[in-house]
Image (tube, helix red, strand yellow):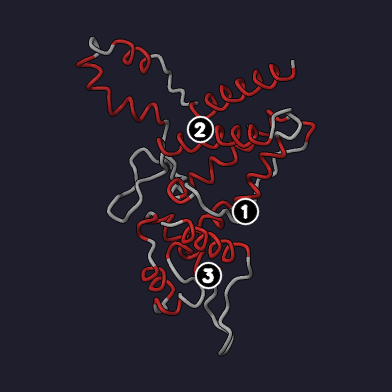
Amino acid sequence: MTEKAEAERHERTAALLWGPPRVPSRGPRPKLSQGRIVDTAVALADAEGIDAVSMQRVASELGYTKMSLYRYVSRRDDLLALMTDTAHGPAPEIGGPELGWRECLRAWGMALWPVLREHPWLLRTAVGVRVMGPNELAWTETALRALSGSGLGGAERLDAIALVAGHVRGIAQQNPPHESGPEHGRDEDAGEDGDEGNLEEAILRAMAPILTQHGERYPETAAAFSSGEGRDFALEFGLECILDGLERRIGRDAG
């Protein structure tokens, strides 16, 4: 894609995300709306995965023709952009300056976790060079505000947010809430709320026969799993390690 074409694509996306919703200029007041289209697409992606979302499928779910959707959303890429911003929802309330940057940034990271669990397809759509919408940008603003008194520069604060978000995304990718798609049944490890059980325990159950048979070749792996005592704190552990590193960096710069 040429620079001109990319700039035009970004301009179109920005107008869609930041401008007023599209409405037909003629005819009676429609029953269909941009918001209804996006909500239907989000629900479809949550249930069956992002690959199930097409203009034709969304139109069928709504009981309209595909051409009807084009009056509000002109292409699938635009729909994905709207879905991504809608799924993020409003930025979290993570407290004021009295809590300190560390507590606020920890709360921000933990608030991102349930969003990715509810909408795991965001791991595919909220990536790359793209225009962010009001909701997603508000998440960034909230995290930057949390670090405003830390002494880090603007670029460093952005990098710190990328570290925290990247860790949360990584854990979410390793521990998806379910296998999307009608061909997959309910996970046997899922609880009543639809969440899986402990990830480490699930991996150990899958690998137990292998580790029993080949434990002598992989003694450290076998010992690590056997001593876990059911703990599965990778999300919190990783966050604390990142925050420890940031705290040390901030202290070094201040010194």
Query: Label 3: which residue?
Result: 36
Q: CA distance from mark 3 to mark 1?
A: 18 Å
Q: Residue at x 58, y 84 (%)?
A: 25
Query: Label 2: which residue?
Result: 167
Vertical side of 142 occupied by 65: above or below: below
Q: Residue at x 44, y 62 (%)?
A: 77
Q: Where on the picture, by quarter, is residue 247? A: top right
Residue 129 drawn at (x, y percent) = 50, 49
Q: Residue at x 43, y 18 (%)?
A: 229
Q: Mark 1: few, some, or many residues within 10 Å (few <14, many ≥20)?
A: some
Q: Mark 3: few, some, or many residues within 10 Å (few <14, many ≥20)?
A: few
Q: Residue at x 65, y 18 (%)?
A: 248
Residue 146 drawn at (x, y percent) = 71, 36
Kind of residue at disc 2: His
Query: Label 1: which residue?
Result: 135
Seen from the viewer's position, the closer of residues 157 and 196 is 157
Vertical side of 191 occupied by 183: above or below: below
